[in-house]
Image (cartoon, coloured by chain):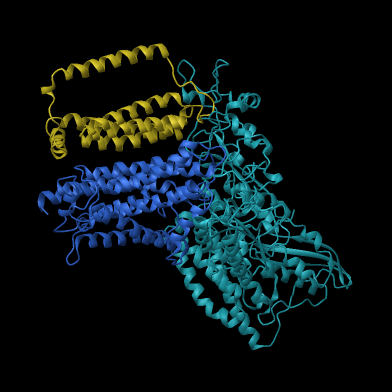
Chain colours: A cyan, B blue, C yellow
C-alpha cells in the first residue's frame, strides 16, 4: 500500500516541483528531537530542516524503537502530513500500525545521511503515483461520523483520512488536529479571551471518548451541517443551562440555538456563579492535547490541558505512555544486564549502564567497563552535561530563543561525541563561555522567574535538579566515595522556580566538566580505575543488592536479586515518575506559555516512567 | 519604470530577507532554501482541516498578502517612484496594516483548532499593544514635514534624519513594526515552540506559500516605512536615490530579522504592559519634543 | 464615469456585507462581515475623493470591528455559528424604522440632486487635509478637545471599574 505519494501522473511540471521538494527536506521527528540528539544525530548538518508541525513536514523520521503506547499517536501524526510524504525509520524496527517505512537505516549520523539520500530518491521518483492510496488505520476511525478532511484532490476511492479523531484526545502532534479531534472542547471554544460560554463543571468534557462531542454541541461550525444536534446536544445543554434563568425551551441560552432571549439579560448576573480561573474571566473550556509528540515538550509526554481561554484549567498527564516493559525484561543473564538497563532512557543510557554495573559490582561481580579510555565517571558526567544541554536546547526552542536552541545543541553533540579527556578539557572553557552568555541573556531571567514554584517541603520524593533548585541538598553522588575524593559538592539553590532549575542545570554542566578534568588528573596521578563503592546489602554470592546513581534527572536506584549468573528479580526506581506528578502542580492556573515552560523546567523523561 | 522598480525590490529584497529569516530561525545560511521551499510547498497537497470555517480559512492568506502589498503602495523609492501618491500616505500605511490583524484573526479562527485560535487571539492582544505605537510616531514625523504626503516627509529630513531628531519615536516605531509583522520576539501568533506553528500551523501547500510570502512582504514594507519615516528614505550622497532606499530598507529589515534570534519570546502580557505603560508615554513625549523642536529650532 | 462605477460597486458591497451580518449563523463571521461592510464604506469614500475620511474609516473601522468581534464572542452565549441563530430581534419595529430611515435618506439625497449647481467639486486631497486640520484646531477645537478628553476619561474609568472587581 503506497500511502506516501500523491495521486497523479508524474508529469513535467510536477517533476520540477518534486526536484525542489527533494532538495529541501522538512522533517518531523518522532518521538522527538531530544531523543534524536541524544542518539547523536545532527539533522541540520545532514541537510534536513526540522519543523514544528507534521503539517509542514515531508519526512517523518522515527528514531529508535517506538513504544506501543505511542504508536497510535504516531499514526495520527503520519496521517496529518500532506502528501507526498516519506517515512524513515532509524533503528526503529517494526513500526506498525504505521505503514512500512520507505527507508530504514541505523540510528547514527551515517545512517541518517544515507536515509536522507534515499528519501530524496524516493521523492524524485515516487512523489506522484497512480497507485497512491489514502492511509487508513484504526486509530483514525472517528467515533462519530464527521465531515471528512478534504485534500486538494481525491485520492482514489476513499478520502484522506480524518485526522485523528482522537478518541484519546491525544493528537499525535499534540493536537495539531485540526478539527475537533482533540479540540475536544473546541466547543464554541473560541475566544482566548472571554467567552462567557461557561461550562461550569467542565461538564461533559471530561470523558475522553466523548471529548469531541463535548464541544461539538454545535458540532463546531458545520455550516449547513446541523444534523448532529439532536440528542447529544440537548444532553449537553442541560449542563449549561445552569446560569440562571434559561428561559423558554425554544431559546436556549447556552449556546445551542443561540439567539438572545427577549428581555434584558445581564451577562454579569448570568455568569456570576461560574468558576473563574486566575485571571477572573469565566470561559469555555477547550481541551487541547499537548503530547505525546509536541515539539517543545519532552517527547513521549502525554499531556492534555483544558484551557480556560489562555489559562490552564485542568491538567491530565497519563503516565506510562512510553513504557516498554523494561523492568520486566531486566530478569535474565547477568552479562546482558547493563545493555538491557541502558534501554530504559534513550536520553541517558550511559547512566543506567553505570547503575547496572554498580549493582553487579555490589554483588561481587565485575561488570564490563563502558568506555575504557574515558572511565566510568567521565562517561556519566559527560552524559549529564550533554543531557542538560539537550534539555537547554529544547527549552530554547520552546522559548523561541533560536540562538540557544542551536548553540546548546551544538555543544551537546560535541560533548556526547568526545572520546577522551583532552577533548573534554578543550571544550570546557568554550562551554563555560557559552553558559555565561546564556546566564546573561536579556529577558531570559525575567521570563523564567517565578514560574512553577515548588517549595522544597512539598516535593515529596522528587530528587535531582528539581529538588536541588528548591533548597534540598539531595544528590546520590554524595554517597559515592569517588566523588567525595574529588571534593564534590552539589549545586543547590533555594528559589524553587524555573529560573532556579535552569541555573542549577547550567551550574551542573560546568561542574560535570570540572569533575571530569579533576578525575582525569587524579587518575593520571595514580593509576587507578574508579571503583564502585556503594555499600552492598549483602555480600553473599547469591545476593540481594542495591545500587543508586545520580542520573541527570535525579536519583535512580536498582535492586537486584542475583542467583549465580542470573538476575532473578529486579526493581528499578527512576526519578521521572515523581517529577511527572508535579506537572499538575506547576501547570494548573498558569497562563498557557508559562505552564509549558514550567513543565519543561521539570525535565521529565517519560521514557523512565515504565508503567 | 515605477512598477518595475517596485517589483524588483519586492522580489530581490524579499528573497534576501527570506534568507535572513532562515538564518534567524535555524542559524544556518542557506541561500537557495527559500526558493526551494516555496516551490516544494507547491508540490505538496493542500489539506483543509476537517471542521473549518472555509471562507475565513481561505480568505485569510490573500487578505494578509493584500494588506502587505497595499501598505507598501504609498512608500516611494525615489522622488516620483511610487505606485500611488496619496495625500494621506502616512496614514494609509497604518490603515493597510490594520488588516494584518484582521487576517490573522481569520486565520486563527478558520481552522477550528485550539492552537491557531489561541494564536490568533494573542495576536489581537499584541495588536492592541502596538496599534497606538504605530500611529503616534507617524504623527510626530508628519508634524515635522507639515504634511502627510510621504515624499514630503522624506524631503523634510534633508537636514537631519528623523532617527536622530526623534530617537524616541524611532525606537518606538521600530519595535511596533516588529510587532506588526510578528517577528521574534513578538512571534506569538506563529510560535513554533509553544503553539506548534500557531495560525500558520494548519496551512499547507499553496496557502502556506501565500502566508509566508505575505509575511515577507510585510517585513519589507515595514522596513521601507522605517527607512522612509526615519532614515531619510532616498536621501544620501553618492548613490542614486533608489539605491539608497533599497540599501537602507534591507539593512533595517535585516536588523529586524536578526534581533529575534537572540531573545526569548515575549510573554503575552509584556507587549501590552510595556506598550501602554511605557510606549505610549514615550510616544507622547516624542510628540511633545518634536513640537518644541519645531517651534524653537525650525529644523 | 469609472469613479461612479467604483462608488456604486463599493456601495453595493457595503450593503451586501451588511446584510450578511444578519444572515450568517456564525458570530465571528457576523463581526467580520460588519468589518468588511465598513471597509467597503471606507473604499467608497476614497472613490468619492474624500481621501482622509476614507483612510480614517478603513483604519478605524478595522480596528474597532476586530475588538468588537472579540466582544461579540465574549458576550453572546452562542459563539460558534453552527446552529441557525436568530440574529434579528424586534422585527416589526426594526422593519418600520428601517423603511422610515431609508425614505428619509433617499429624500434628502434626491432633494440635493435637484440643484446640481449647489454641488461643489470636492477639493483636492491636500486642500481637504488642510481644511480639516484648520477646522479641528480653529473653529471646532473645543468640541474635539472636549470629546477627546471625555473618551479618555471613559477609558480610564472603565479600566478602573473593571479592575476593582478583581480585588
Q: Position of residue B130 (x, y in %)?
A: 34, 45
The residue drawn where x is 46% and y is 37% is B56
| Residue in front for this viewpoint, A148 or B219 | A148
The residue drawn where x is 64% and y is 87% is A524
Dividing the picture into quadrants, the one containing residue A497 is: bottom right
Q: Is residue B267 visible?
A: no
Q: Position of residue A358 (x, y in %)?
A: 75, 72
Taking the image as shown, residue C117 lies to the left or right of residue A292, namely left
Q: Position of residue A397 (x, y in %)?
A: 51, 58
Q: How many marks?
A: 0
Q: Quadrant of the N terminus of chain B?
A: bottom left
In this picture, is C144 found above or below B44?
above
Q: Quadrant of the C terminus of chain B?
A: bottom left
| Residue in front for this viewpoint, A168 or A207 | A168
The residue drawn where x is 16% and y is 38% is C125
Q: Position of residue B178 (x, y in %)?
A: 36, 52
In this picture, is B49 found above or below B297?
above
Q: Is residue A550 visible?
A: yes
| Residue in front for this viewpoint, A423 or C6 | C6
Amino acid at each position: 500500500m503506497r500511502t506516501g505519494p500523491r495521486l497523479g501522473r508524474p508529469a513535467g511540471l510536477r517533476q520540477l516541483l518534486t526536484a525542489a521538494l527533494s532538495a529541501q527536506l522538512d522533517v518531523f521527528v518522532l518521538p522527538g528531537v531530544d531523543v534524536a540528539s541524544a542518539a547523536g544525530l545532527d539533522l541540520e548538518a545532514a541537510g534536513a530542516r526540522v519543523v514544528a508541525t507534521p503539517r509542514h513536514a515531508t519526512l517523518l523520521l522515527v528514531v529508535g524503537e517506538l513504544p506501543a503506547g505511542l504508536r497510535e499517536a504516531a499514526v495520527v501524526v503520519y496521517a496529518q502530513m500532506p502528501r507526498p510524504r516519506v517515512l524513515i525509520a532509524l533503528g526503529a524496527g517494526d513500526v506498525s500500525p504505521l505503514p512500512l517505512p520507505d527507508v530504514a537505516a541505523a540510528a547514527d549520523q551515517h545512517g541518517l545521511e544515507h536515509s536522507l539520500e534515499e528519501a530524496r530518491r524516493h521523492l524524485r521518483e515516487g512523489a506522484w503515483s497512480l497507485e497512491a492510496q489514502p492511509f487508513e488505520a484504526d486509530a483514525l476511525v472517528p467515533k462519530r461520523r464527521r465531515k471528512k478532511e478534504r485534500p486538494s484532490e481525491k485520492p482514489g476511492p476513499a478520502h484522506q483520512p480524518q485526522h485523528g479523531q482522537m478518541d484519546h484526545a491525544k493528537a499525535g502532534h499534540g493536537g495539531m488536529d485540526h478539527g475537533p479531534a482533540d479540540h475536544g472542547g473546541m466547543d464554541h471554544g473560541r475566544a482566548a479571551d472571554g467567552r462567557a460560554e461557561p461550562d461550569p463543571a467542565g461538564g461533559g468534557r471530561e470523558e475522553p471518548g466523548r471529548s469531541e462531542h463535548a464541544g461539538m454541541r454545535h458540532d463546531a461550525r458545520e455550516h449547513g451541517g446541523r444534523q448532529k444536534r439532536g440528542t447529544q446536544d440537548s444532553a449537553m445543554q442541560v449542563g449549561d443551562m445552569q446560569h440562571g434563568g434559561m428561559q423558554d425551551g425554544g431559546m436556549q441560552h447556552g449556546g445551542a440555538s443561540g439567539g438572545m432571549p427577549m428581555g434584558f439579560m445581564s451577562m454579569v448576573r448570568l455568569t456570576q456563579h461560574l468558576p473563574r480561573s486566575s485571571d477572573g474571566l469565566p470561559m469555555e473550556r477547550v481541551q487541547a492535547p499537548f503530547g505525546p509528540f509536541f515539539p517543545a515538550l519532552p517527547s513521549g509526554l502525554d499531556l492534555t490541558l483544558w484551557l480556560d481561554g489562555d489559562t490552564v484549567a485542568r491538567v491530565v498527564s497519563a503516565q506510562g505512555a512510553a513504557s516498554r516493559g523494561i523492568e520486566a525484561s531486566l530478569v535474565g543473564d547477568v552479562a546482558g544486564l547493563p545493555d538491557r538497563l541502558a534501554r530504559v532512557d534513550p536520553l541517558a543510557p550511559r547512566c543506567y549502564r553505570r547503575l547496572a554495573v554498580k549493582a553487579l559490582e555490589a554483588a561481587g561481580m565485575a561488570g564490563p567497563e563502558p568506555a575504557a579510555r574515558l572511565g566510568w565517571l567521565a562517561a556519566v558526567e559527560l552524559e549529564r552535561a550533554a543531557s542538560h544541554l539537550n534539555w537547554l536546547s529544547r527549552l530554547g526552542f520552546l522559548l523561541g530563543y533560536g540562538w540557544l536552541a542551536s548553540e546548546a545543541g551544538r555543544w551537546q553533540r560535541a560533548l556526547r561525541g568526545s572520546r577522551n579527556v583532552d577533548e573534554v578539557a578543550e571544550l570546557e572553557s568554550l562551554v563555560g563561555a557559552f553558559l555565561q552568555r546564556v546566564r546573561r541573556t536579556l529577558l531570559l531571567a525575567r521570563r523564567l522567574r517565578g514560574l512553577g514554584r515548588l517549595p522544597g517541603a512539598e516535593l515529596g520524593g522528587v530528587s535531582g535538579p528539581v529538588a536541588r533548585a528548591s533548597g534540598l541538598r539531595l544528590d546520590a553522588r554524595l554517597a559515592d566515595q569517588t566523588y567525595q575524593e574529588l571534593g564534590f559538592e552539589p549545586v543547590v539553590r533555594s528559589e524553587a522556580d524555573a529560573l532556579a532549575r535552569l541555573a542549577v542545570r547550567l551550574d551542573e554542566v560546568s561542574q560535570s566538566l570540572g569533575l571530569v578534568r579533576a578525575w582525569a588528573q587524579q587518575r593520571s596521578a595514580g593509576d587507578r580505575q574508579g571503583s564502585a563503592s556503594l555499600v552492598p546489602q549483602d555480600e553473599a554470592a547469591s545476593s540481594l543488592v542495591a545500587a543508586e546513581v545520580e542520573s541527570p534527572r535525579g536519583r535512580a536506584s536498582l535492586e537486584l536479586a542475583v542467583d549465580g549468573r542470573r538476575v532473578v528479580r529486579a526493581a528499578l526506581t527512576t526519578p521521572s515518575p515523581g517529577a511527572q506528578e508535579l506537572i499538575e502542580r506547576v501547570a494548573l492556573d498558569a497562563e498557557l506559555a508559562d505552564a509549558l515552560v514550567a513543565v519543561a523546567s521539570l525535565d521529565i523523561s517519560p521514557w523512565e516512567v515504565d508503567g | 519604470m515605477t512598477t518595475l522598480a517596485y517589483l524588483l525590490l519586492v522580489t530581490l529584497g524579499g528573497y534576501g530577507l527570506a534568507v535572513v529569516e532562515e538564518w534567524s530561525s535555524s542559524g544556518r545560511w542557506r541561500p537557495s532554501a527559500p526558493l526551494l521551499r516555496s516551490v516544494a510547498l507547491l508540490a505538496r497537497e493542500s489539506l483543509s482541516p476537517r471542521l473549518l470555517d472555509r471562507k475565513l480559512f481561505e480568505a485569510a492568506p490573500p487578505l494578509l498578502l493584500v494588506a502587505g502589498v497595499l501598505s507598501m503602495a504609498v512608500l516611494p523609492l525615489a522622488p516620483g517612484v511610487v505606485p500611488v501618491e496619496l495625500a494621506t500616505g502616512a496614514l494609509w500605511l497604518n490603515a493597510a496594516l490594520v488588516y494584518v490583524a484582521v487576517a490573522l484573526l481569520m486565520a486563527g479562527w478558520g481552522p477550528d483548532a485550539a492552537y491557531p485560535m489561541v494564536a490568533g487571539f494573542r495576536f489581537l492582544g499584541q495588536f492592541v499593544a502596538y496599534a497606538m505605537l504605530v500611529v503616534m510616531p507617524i504623527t510626530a514625523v508628519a508634524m515635522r514635514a507639515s504634511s502627510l504626503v510621504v515624499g514630503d516627509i522624506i524631503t523634510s529630513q534633508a537636514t537631519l534624519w528623523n532617527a536622530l531628531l526623534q530617537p524616541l519615536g524611532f525606537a518606538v516605531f521600530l519595535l511596533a513594526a516588529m510587532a506588526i509583522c510578528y517577528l521574534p520576539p513578538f512571534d506569538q501568533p506563529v510560535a513554533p515552540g509553544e503553539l506548534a506553528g500557531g495560525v500558520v500551523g494548519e496551512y499547507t501547500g499553496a496557502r502556506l506559500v501565500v502566508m509566508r510570502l505575505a509575511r515577507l512582504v510585510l517585513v519589507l514594507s515595514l522596513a521601507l516605512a522605517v527607512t522612509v519615516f526615519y532614515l531619510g528614505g532616498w536621501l544620501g550622497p553618492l548613490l542614486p536615490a533608489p539605491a539608497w532606499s533599497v540599501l537602507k530598507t534591507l539593512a533595517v529589515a535585516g536588523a529586524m530579522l536578526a534581533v529575534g534570534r537572540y531573545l526569548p519570546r515575549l510573554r503575552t502580557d509584556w507587549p501590552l504592559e510595556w506598550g501602554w505603560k511605557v510606549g505610549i508615554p514615550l510616544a507622547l513625549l516624542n510628540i511633545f519634543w518634536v513640537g518644541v523642536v519645531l517651534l524653537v529650532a525650525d529644523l | 464615469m469609472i469613479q461612479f462605477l467604483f462608488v456604486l460597486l463599493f456601495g453595493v458591497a457595503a450593503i451586501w456585507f451588511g446584510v450578511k451580518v444578519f444572515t450568517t449563523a456564525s458570530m465571528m463571521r457576523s463581526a467580520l462581515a460588519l468589518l468588511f461592510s465598513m471597509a467597503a464604506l471606507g473604499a467608497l469614500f476614497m472613490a468619492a475623493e474624500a481621501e482622509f475620511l476614507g483612510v480614517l474609516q478603513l483604519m478605524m473601522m478595522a480596528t474597532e470591528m476586530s475588538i468588537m468581534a472579540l466582544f461579540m464572542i465574549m458576550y453572546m452565549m452562542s459563539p460558534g455559528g453552527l446552529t441557525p441563530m436568530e440574529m434579528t430581534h424586534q422585527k416589526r419595529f426594526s422593519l418600520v424604522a428601517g423603511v422610515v430611515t431609508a425614505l428619509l435618506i433617499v429624500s434628502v439625497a434626491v432633494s440635493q440632486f435637484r440643484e446640481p449647481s449647489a454641488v461643489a467639486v470636492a477639493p483636492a486631497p491636500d486642500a481637504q487635509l488642510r481644511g480639516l486640520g484648520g477646522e479641528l484646531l480653529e473653529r471646532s477645537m473645543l468640541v474635539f478637545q472636549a470629546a477627546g478628553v471625555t473618551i479618555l476619561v471613559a477609558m480610564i474609568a472603565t479600566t478602573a471599574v473593571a479592575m476593582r472587581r478583581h480585588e
